[in-house]
Amino acid sequence: MWLSDYAADLSMAINGFAATGLILDYELTTDIRTDTLGLIKGNLTFVDESRLFFTEYLDTENEIEKLAYSFHYQTRDHTLIFRYDNAAHKPALEFAHHKHTQSGIEPAKVPDLAGVVEEIFGLLEKSV
């Protein structure tokens, strides 16, 4: 898959989520290094003014491989709600892919934007 196709699919998905009315605003930027390698960054602002910041460094040559990623969700006043990432820690964690919450760090599967946004929508519904 070409990276530009992945970025176009991501943009369509964000537009679909925005149609729900739960997203106030969003930005998406793509830094294509080669046809199959590059960086996608963005942020979404939700109706309660919470924000999701995400970065994916991707290699799409054979399959979609997230070389590095972060999905950071925070409240309006910048308090962490959760963050998925695969950043190395010192001391090292027993798992590469993990989720930070206010309770600590736990193992997690490699997330995709759609799954993270659905998780946020669930949290927004609970807070109403």
Image (spheres, helix red, strand yellow):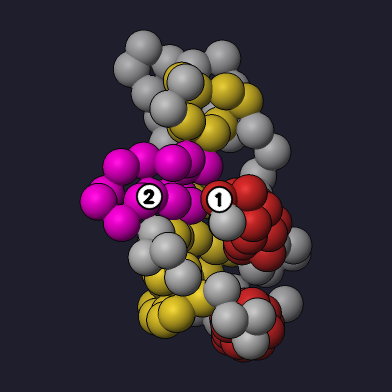
Q: Position of residue 123 (x, y in %)?
A: 60, 50
Q: Position of residue 113 (x, y in %)?
A: 61, 62
Q: Residue furthest left?
A: 77
Q: Is residue 114 above or below residue 13?
A: above
Q: Which residue is mark 2?
A: 74
Q: Which residue is mark 1?
A: 127
Q: Position of residue 94 (x, y in %)?
A: 56, 14
Q: Can I make out residue 56 in this image? A: yes
Range shown magenta: 70-86
- On the image, which quarter does residue 116 sit in? bottom right
Magenta segment main secondary structure: strand
Image marks 1 and 2: residues in contact by CB distance under 8 Å = no
Residue type at mark 1 is Ser
Q: Residue at the spot x=36%, y=51% of the render? A: 75
Q: Residue at the spot x=55%, y=50% of the render? A: 127
Residue closest to the eye, 92 or 73: 73
Q: Specify the quadrant that holds the N terminus.
A: bottom right
Question: Magenta segment: does it hold 22?
Answer: no
Dot 1 alpha-carbon crowd within 10 angstroms: few under 14, some 14 to 19, many 20 or more: few
Mark 1–mark 2 Cα distance, whole angstroms, equals 14 Å
Residue type at mark 2 is Gln
Q: Residue at the spot x=25%, y=51% of the render? A: 77
Q: Is residue 53 above or below residue 22?
A: above
Q: Specify the quadrant that holds the C terminus.
A: bottom right
Query: Is 65 on the left-hand or right-hand side of 73?
Result: right
Query: Is 91 on the left-hand or right-hand side of 104?
Result: left
Question: Magenta segment: does it hold 83?
Answer: yes
* Mark nearer the viewer, 1 or 2: 1
Residue closest to the eye, 43 or 1: 43
